[in-house]
Amino acid sequence: MPSSPVPPSVAEELRRLEVRWQQLALPEAMSRLPVVRAVVESIAGEPVPDLGPAVVMDQLTVVVYDACLALADHPLAPAGGSSPPASVGAGPKPVSSDGSGPPPAEGDDWVAASPVGGSSPPAGGSSPPAAEGAGMADLLEQLIALRRALTS
């Protein structure tokens, strides 16, 4: 059976996010849910159903797996390949802890590297293929920024 397309560093960051999410009290998780959902939708490149705080980490895991599969030349990738969503590898966008504004803390440049939003496709209407290394690095950066936003 082929191995997972998710690199160990990304898998470890997902694990850390899940642990942090489980540590949040429900009111705190509910207040931070929009931030997590924005990241999920950014990585997915499309709207994702709001299934609440109990499921959002599973949704994140699925969209990260799909993004990694699209970025990697992996045996499980669909025939003919697929391109990752425009937001994967497009570079992160600034976000506050509620997902609506500027970075939450002065001096936390990595927090400003949160993935809310995405790039628009070029005039031709299709996304440029992301380089695997750069796309994976951007994805990992997005996950780290999310974890840090959950711990602030």
Image: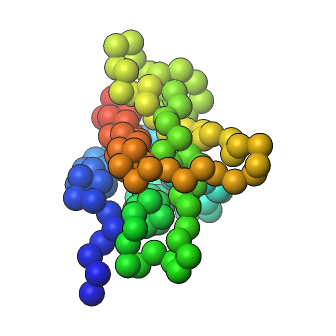
Question: Seen in the image, is 129 located left or right of residue 47?
Answer: left
Colour convention: rainbow
Residue in view at x 35 percent, y 44 percent: 137
Looking at the image, the residue that sits furthest to the bottom is 1
Q: In the image shown, does 134 or 25 lie closer to the viewer?
A: 134
Question: Seen in the image, is 17 located left or right of residue 8?
Answer: right
Residue 24: percent from the left, percent from the top?
33, 45
Above/below status of 88 relative to 104: below
Q: Quadrant of residue 118?
A: top right
Q: Quadrant of residue 123?
A: top right
Residue 14: percent from the left, percent from the top?
31, 55
Q: Please state, as top left, top right, bottom left or bottom right, where the C terminus lies in the image.
A: top left
Whether residue 111 appears in this view of the structure is: yes
Residue in view at x 36 percent, y 27 percent: 110
Residue 146: percent from the left, percent from the top?
39, 40
Q: How many marks?
A: 0
Residue 87: percent from the left, percent from the top?
56, 46
Looking at the image, the residue that sits furthest to the top is 106
Whether residue 22 appears in this view of the structure is: no
Above/below status of 148 relative to 42: above
Residue in view at x 29 percent, y 54 percent: 10
Above/below status of 138 relative to 57: above
Q: Please state, as top left, top right, bottom left or bottom right, where the N terminus lies in the image.
A: bottom left
